[in-house]
Amino acid sequence: MQNKKSGFTLIEVLIVVAIIGLLASIVLVGLGSFRARGRDARRVADLRQTQNALELFYTKNNAYPVVNSWSALETALVGASIGVSKISDDPLGASRSYVYAPGPVQGPGPQSYMLRSQLEDPANPVLNDDVDGTVFGQDCSDPFYCVQF
């Protein structure tokens, strides 16, 4: 009788593991741009939700908030009793932040404002539909996505 062993040698297993590792690294590098696009889409959606909250604030107060930071804007919107409990921060956290800039004060307060976020993809098509230049003292050139109302 012959004693036949079946299975893989150590070299064969190492080669398979190396090939799987190489393929996984290629896939993960390729997915990086999709993750950045997803974060950019969230940034645009966050600014639109903040715009809705600002319009509710305006309806109640006949002016937009006079604040100079994103956290102060959140405090003003939450404290206005308009049904807002929180506004979103940038997906990357403290390394980037959204910007709110009120327009000039007229009558009871500002009648316009600008919201800004820095996008990760400078070729994002949404940058074709935003405000460019300088708005209320803020740079809105690409890759900054700015909306003004």
Image (cartoon, rainbow, N blue to C red):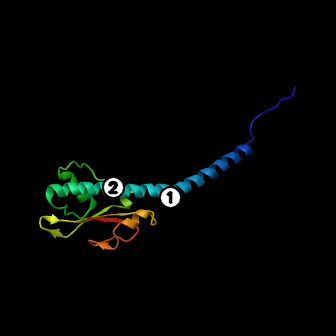
**Where residue 78 appears, x then y in whole percent?**
21, 51
**Which residue shows up at 40% across the image and 56% down it?**
41
**Where residue 113 appears, x then y in whole percent?**
24, 65
- In the rendered view, would you say 12 is above or below 119? above
- In the rendered view, would you say 127 is above or below 76? below
- In the rendered view, would you say 3 is above or below 9? above
**Which residue shows up at 14% across the image and 57% down it?**
61
Residue denoted by label 2: 46
Mark 1 lies on a secondary structure that is helix
Q: Which amino acid, mark 1?
A: Ser
* Residue 91 visible in the snapshot: no
Which residue of the protein is positioned furthest toward the right in this rendering? 1
- Using residue 91 as the reference point, say whether residue 24 is left or right of it: right
**Which residue shows up at 21% across the image and 63% down it?**
67
Instruction: Choose top left, top right, bottom left or bottom right for residue 108.
Output: bottom left
* Residue 48 visible in the snapshot: yes
Instruction: Choose top left, top right, bottom left or bottom right for residue 111.
Output: bottom left
Pointer 2 local density, CA inside 10 Å: few below 14, some 14–19, many at least 20: some
Earlier-in-chain disc, 2 versus 1: 1
Which residue of the protein is positioned furthest toward the left in this rendering? 107
Q: In which quarter of the image is the N terminus?
A: top right
**Where residue 106 appears, x then y in whole percent?**
14, 69
Question: In the drawing, what numbered circle is on residue 33?
Answer: 1
Pointer 1 local density, CA inside 10 Å: few below 14, some 14–19, many at least 20: few
Q: Which amino acid, mark 2?
A: Asp
Instruction: Choose top left, top right, bottom left or bottom right for residue 30.
Output: bottom right
Cα distance in 3D space between marks 2 and 1:
20 Å
**Where residue 31 appears, x then y in whole percent?**
53, 54
